[in-house]
Amino acid sequence: MLVSLKWLQQYVNVDADPQEIAHALTMAGLEVEGVHDRFAHLQKVVVGEILSAEPVKKSDHLQVCQVNAGGQTLQVVCGAPNARAGLKAPLALQGAEFPDGMVISKGKLMGQVSEGMLCSEKELEVGANAGGIMELDDSLTPGQNLAEALNLSDTVFELGITPNRSDCLSMIGVARELAAIYGVEMTLPDASLPEEGDAVEDVTSVDILDPDHCPRYAARVIKGIKIGPSPNWLAQALLAVGIRPISNIVDVTNYVMMETGQPLHAFDYDLLEENRIVVRLAAKGEKFTTLDSKENELEDDMLMICDGKKAVALAGVMGGLNSEINDNTTNVLIESAHFSPMSVRKTAKRLGYHTEASHRFERGTDHEGVLFAAQRAAQLMMQTAGGVCAKGAVDAHPVTVEKVEITLSASRTNEILGTDIPFDQIVKYLESVNMEVTPIDQDSMKVLAPVYRVDVSRPEDLMEEVARLFGYDNIPTTWPAATMEIHPSDPIRDFGLKLRTSLSGQGFREAINYSFVGADTPQRLMLAESDKRTQTLPILNPLTEDQAVMRTSLLPGLFASVAVNINYQNKDLALFEIGKTFIAEKGQELPTEIESLCLVLSGAAAAPSWQSKAVRTDFFEMKGCCEALMADFHIENAEYSRIEDDSAPYLVKGQCAQIVCQGQRVGVLGKVKPEVLKGFEVKQDVFVAEFNAAALLAAVPDALTYQAPPRFPATDRDITIVLDKKVEAEAVLAHVRKMDQEWIRALEVVAVYEGEPVPEGKKSLSFRITYRSDSTTLQDKEVNEVHEGIGKELTEAFGAA
């Protein structure tokens, strides 16, 4: 933000040079990124006196002027209609450089030599008039530097205002900081004005239909104004802060916004049907054309300002083309309102706008400054455009904003800051920034923060205020005294480190994503309303719409990582993430935090070579990764079975499974549904595995049992049975395990077949059993007896053949 020192001096008088002020502001937390001489471009611009002006042959507007530049006469070709002999005007000499980058040099126009340039107010950025060269007072001396002659001097500070300090997005806000830093008084502008018109209630009304998004809306009406250019002082002030003057009414709204930080809008009163204001939400698909002639299609959560029949403005963002101030405007309605930062941010982001108004509303404005800004605007409009102001202001105020009350300890403040600031001095610092302080005892105080200080909500914020005003460079360097304590290690954290080692060894890369996701994420994952993962925790001041709530799953962040990689043609992916998810349990003050692990595979599992084609990732590739992970942690007898409930609606049925260890589900895996991937803009198949890290850790054995290498040989036997196709292979294997045959060492499926000669509705299942004894070499007869017994048991249990 650009800040004019000359403008600031209207409110606060600081006896310091610009560089000192810049340093003081920076040390108080308002970083000054640059300090500029406002009129540095006028160094080679002097007062010129036109001695003669002769028309250029074959030109209908150019004149050759002989100009007295003070000790020398220069020839200048000029196209301004008001160039005439005897006129004194600004003369830019050779080498003069203008803010737009233009450099004046000697040249020819229509065959005539031109040794400089006669300038308009707009070209010099000292006013808004571009209709001719600037006419100077006859008393000025030719050759005198223009800035000195017109007493033009100002310094512009370029401030980097952080999002939490919206109270400083104005001249008064910065002046308030300077007054506190230097310990001087601050003077607010007098906004008094004559009110000689009808009662405002007789000429307009305001109806707020959505008080959550618009807790306050004030309106004033002025009739009989005359649209025209702004006076020089107003145009100069706006140019100093980088705003282009337009007309007196529009310029006043911009001036008051920069002065107070309260965005305003002026409507042509006669274009408001029924001469009233209605604040409502848009209808889905409603069309609205803004001042930039852009037609926008609206969503049903966008706040609109309307008259009796139609929308006339995007609340807090931009006005409408159908009610803008124009050359024929004679009556105006001034809007000064307080809008929800979230509402304005959503609307502006979706529609692609970022205006001076939305910039301020998104960060929070002064709820209590609404009326003052409207009155100040009415005062300046009457000064610059005439007219009669209606008596009073409509102030629709359905929601009040209470001041935040905070208890602060002086001793704790000094302990945190490493200072020894007296209690009374702490009170003085806080009161200098308009905090209301009431001592409780010799150490504690009750503090009420102004409503415009949206960044102050807890004792630490007040401590920061004390530190800023005491001066960061005045805080002594001290070593804090602390007792060293050895805390027991966190099992989950240690387990997470081991998981990272294991997965990295498998070729996975770790992803670290934000814990914030969009509010619609549960719906995009197709989660049922009864699923706890739909109970999201909203963020108070989200930076963007897609970071509005705390995540309840790691999947959205990993899907985003996959989408980005695919867009960069990195399509073969093996990613994992370990992090917390947050469930906002009903009745709990704080959310339940769950340490989670998520794996993602996509693209090719094996790269192509001259010997083979690429092998695409599939369900079994992910299952193998999960089995390898289990093996690393010596987790035995993990069971993979069908997911019977709706806990993973984002996975394809028939290509997903739950992982159960010791009777407890530790995770799920499977292929993600294409419609879910489409919602996250992922353009290829993705396979995932999700684990509850605590449940997985519980399955890790506390101690490993030593197993000696086998002393006796093993033998394999295959068995093939024909059974109903609906029977899962895992059910058959589980049945064999329950038989608890001591010689069985391994079970694996080797083939599944459907088709001729297998009867319809049946399938052939072949699996292999490995037998071994720990005490003797098994004989074929012994193994065959056991094997045949298993076959008979399965035939009876599953009606197999």
Image (cartoon, grey):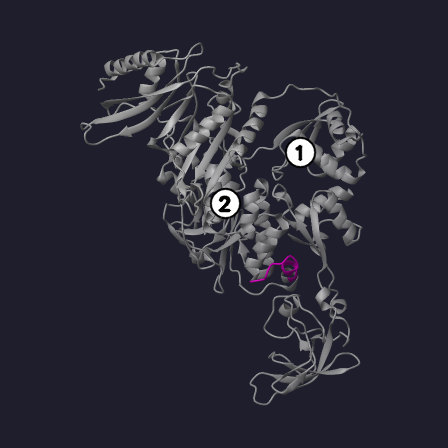
Pinpoint residue 1: horizontal percent, then vertical percent: 64, 52
User: Mark 1 sits on what residue?
Assistant: 461
Mark 2, other Cα within 10 Å: few <14 / some 14–19 / many ≥20: many
Side of 756 where 26 appears, left or right: right
Look at mark 2 in the image and give the residue it sits on. Answer: 344
Is residue 238 part of the magenta span, yes or no? yes
Residue 143 vs residue 732, the one in the foreground: 732
The residue closer to the viewer here, 13 or 739, is 739
Residue 135 point in image, percent of width and height: 67, 74
Up-down: is 350 above or below 474? below
Tell which residue pokes out farthest to the top in this image.
775
Identity of the amino acid at label 1?
Asp
Question: Is residue 593 visible in the rendered structure shown here?
Answer: no
Label 2, secondary structure: give it. helix
At 77% from the left and 52% from the top, the residue drawn is 19
> What's the distance in space between the residues labelled 2 and 1, CA to CA?
26 Å
- Between 158 and 88, the one lying in front of the other is 158
367 with respect to 763 (left or right): right
Provide the residue span drawn in magenta. 236-246
The residue sitting at the bottom extreme is 57
Q: Please tell me which of labels 2 and 1 falls first in the chain.
A: 2
Within the image, what quadrant is residue 717 found in?
A: top left
Secondary structure type for disc 1:
helix
Q: Is residue 33 magenta?
A: no
Residue shown at 78% from the left, 79% from the top? 70
